Image: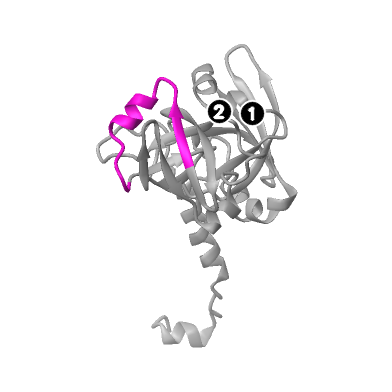
Amino acid sequence: MFTGLIQALGTVKALGGDRFAIDIQGHGASQVMSDLALGDSVAVDGVCLTVETIAEQGFVATASPETLKRTILGDAVARSNWVNIETSLRVGSKIGGHFVSGHVDTIGALEKVVETARAWELWFTAIADYQATWDMNISPCLVSKGSIAVNGISLTVAECDRLGQWFKVAVIPHTYAETNLAYLKPGSWVNLEGDILAKYVQRFVSYQREQKAPDIGLDFLQEHGYL
């Protein structure tokens, strides 16, 4: 479990097959490395990976076939040159973002970026190849002022359309400068994870709708003691 508050940036090098070497850099690297242990969970661009080998300035991890299919981790072209790094949440730690599981739902694309006087506004849209997973996992979770994780970053939805096919976020200068959002360009692909609380609500509501309502007639009322 993570909070979506990025601690450092890093790079990813494919080692062949499903193994990757993550090199952690920047001013937050020493903080991450000082406490890193085998078996730890680390979010890499929002993808939860398990530390299998610790290197001098990073670690090696293996990604499952589902992870490679659902995220941009294994795509050297789609993946940003810099990836966001966050270690797992400790019990008792501050939760400054929202609960992020590290289980990416689908891939989206940055449509445009607008710099304002006090923030950066970014629009994200669905991609044709990932439309089905967007419609299933992202659209139902999009609500104004709700939470969403973009490349593992906890962000607030500033605006979205009624059908949930696009959303806008407003990013403060600190977040923009300290994450890989600053390196994205229109058309760049990103990992998206919907709010886990919204997912549970969606599942509960859809389950309730699927249940066939009983026919309330005289026999039903009598059986339940109303007549």
- Asked whether the viewer can see residue 30, the reply is yes
Where is residue 97? Give x, y as percent. 42, 33
- Residue 24 highlighted magenta (yes or no): yes
In this picture, residue 57 sits left or right of residue 92: right
Q: Most extreme residue toward the top, as rendered? A: 117
Query: For the image shown, how many numbered marks are present on the structure?
Result: 2
- Residue 176 highlighted magenta (yes or no): no
Q: Residue 131 versus residue 80: which sits nearer the camera?
A: 80
Q: Residue 159 versus residue 2: which sits nearer the camera?
A: 2
Give the residue type at disc 1. Answer: Leu
Q: Are marks 2 and 1 in contact (CB under 8 Å)?
A: yes
Q: Which residue is mark 1?
A: 184
* Residue at x 49%, y 18% (from the top left corner): 174
Q: Residue 184 versus residue 62: which sits nearer the camera?
A: 62
- Asked whether the viewer can see residue 149, the reply is no
Q: Which mark is residue 180?
A: 2
**Vertical placement of residue 71 versus 65, above or below:** above
Query: Magenta residues?
Result: 21-39
* Residue at x 63%, y 54% (from the top left corner): 133
Where is residue 132? Give x, y as percent. 68, 56
Q: Most extreme residue toward the right, as rendered? A: 128
Which quadrant of the view contains residue 213?
bottom right
* Residue at x 40%, y 20% (from the top left corner): 27
Where is residue 39? Give x, y as percent. 32, 48
